[in-house]
Amino acid sequence: MKLTSKGRYAVMALVDLARFNNINPVSLRDISLRQGISLDYLEQIFSKLRKNEIVQSVRGIQGGYILNKKAKEIKLTNIFDAVDEKVKTVQCKKDSKKGCNGKATKCLTHNLWDELENHINDFFKEKSLEDLVKDNAERRV
Amino acid sequence: MKLTSKGRYAVMALVDLARFNNINPVSLRDISLRQGISLDYLEQIFSKLRKNEIVQSVRGIQGGYILNKKAKEIKLTNIFDAVDEKVKTVQCKKDSKKGCNGKATKCLTHNLWDELENHINDFFKEKSLEDLVKDNAERRV
DNA sequence: CCATACTTGACTATTTTAGTCAGGTTTATA
DNA sequence: TATAAACCTGACTAAAATAGTCAAGTATGG
């Protein structure tokens, strides 16, 4: 059970961005350098974040990205949704009327995995970008 | 972020086993048929469960496996440990004195991932096999 | 003594991840 | 209005992890 780096990077980059947000757009190049994430990969990630209206892009020289909402209103769950980082505990279709794996009944542990999924998602729904900026203030270099 | 089938199968198989446990050893063949898990794969999984003293094997005709402790005392966390299902949210070494990714400081979101890991592990520590048997009683066929 | 059941370890196809690479387009500003 | 800085897009791929399979055992109860 592990987090993929796409989800992790998305959050790292947004926290980075959120810290400078009120001043100017932040370029991906800067985030790339500060966070040690490949620029090309960041572009993929930010493309999704923009489509999901988490960030806005500012083109041209001195351009970059800014948050599209207040940091308080951006929850982890929004970020993960945007980059397709999903919590998957079962293989069986969630909403199928049938049971799991073609059986008539639910698999023995179906409820457990649902519960686990909810438990994790609750965490994601609570945490906002603002919380992260506050909690994790890294000393400037 | 997803659960691997090794961990899921281990739990499914143990719940199946726990339901018949007081009567006779349960053969992997039966579990395989009931749960739709390949016998060979189950053998790999049970080998680890046995080494970690979650189950005992009973050889010979009418043999199989029985739980090595009371269902109440077997927590999800024990099962996942046994089959190497680990919760991994960070890539950086957990106990390294240095920061993450060779930097001097912790990465911006390090605390967050630690918190998430703990949140998930708490869930695993609470749930016992007994809980699962009670919660998920599947109607016999 | 042998069928049943467990045991072990090597092997492999598939899928996913974590990017790279190439070739754009847009826009601020000098 | 030229151009450099920045974003945008999609195809491609190496490496790792996953989810098993396969083969060849060993132990034991009846």
Image (cartoon, coloured by chain):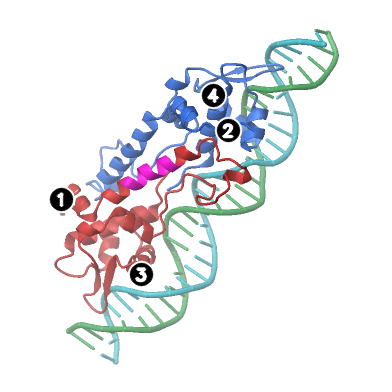
Chain colours: A blue, B red, C cyan, D green
Is circle 3 on the same chain as circle 4?
no
Spatial CA span between label 3 and label 4: 48 Å
Q: Is residue B136 left or right of residue A43?
A: left
Q: Is residue C4 above or below residue A90?
A: below
Closer to the camera in the image, B61 or B111: B111
| Number of residues whose C-alpha sits closer than 10 Å to that of mark 4, classed few (under 14), some (14–19) or many (20 or more) | many
Amino acid on which disc 4 is placed: Ala
Residue B36 at x, y percent in the picture: 31, 56
- Tell me the quarter of the picture where residue D29 sits: bottom left
Q: Which SS class for mark 1?
A: loop
Letter of the chain that mark 2 sits on in the rendering: A
Q: Report the disc number at residue B139.
A: 1
Amino acid on which disc 1 is placed: Arg
Residue B6 falls inside the magenta stretch: no
| Number of residues whose C-alpha sits closer than 10 Å to that of mark 2, classed few (under 14), some (14–19) or many (20 or more) | few
Q: Which residue is mark 4?
A: A18
Q: Is residue D11 left or right of residue B66?
A: right
Give the residues drawn in magenta, as a range: B114-122
Letter of the chain that mark 3 sits on in the rendering: B
Spatial CA span between label 2 and label 4: 15 Å
Can residue A86 be seen here? yes
Is circle 2 on the same chain as circle 4?
yes
Q: Which residue is mark 3?
A: B51
Amino acid on which disc 2 is placed: Arg
Q: Nearer the viewer, mark 3 or mark 1?
A: 3
- Tell me the quarter of the picture where residue B108 sits: top right
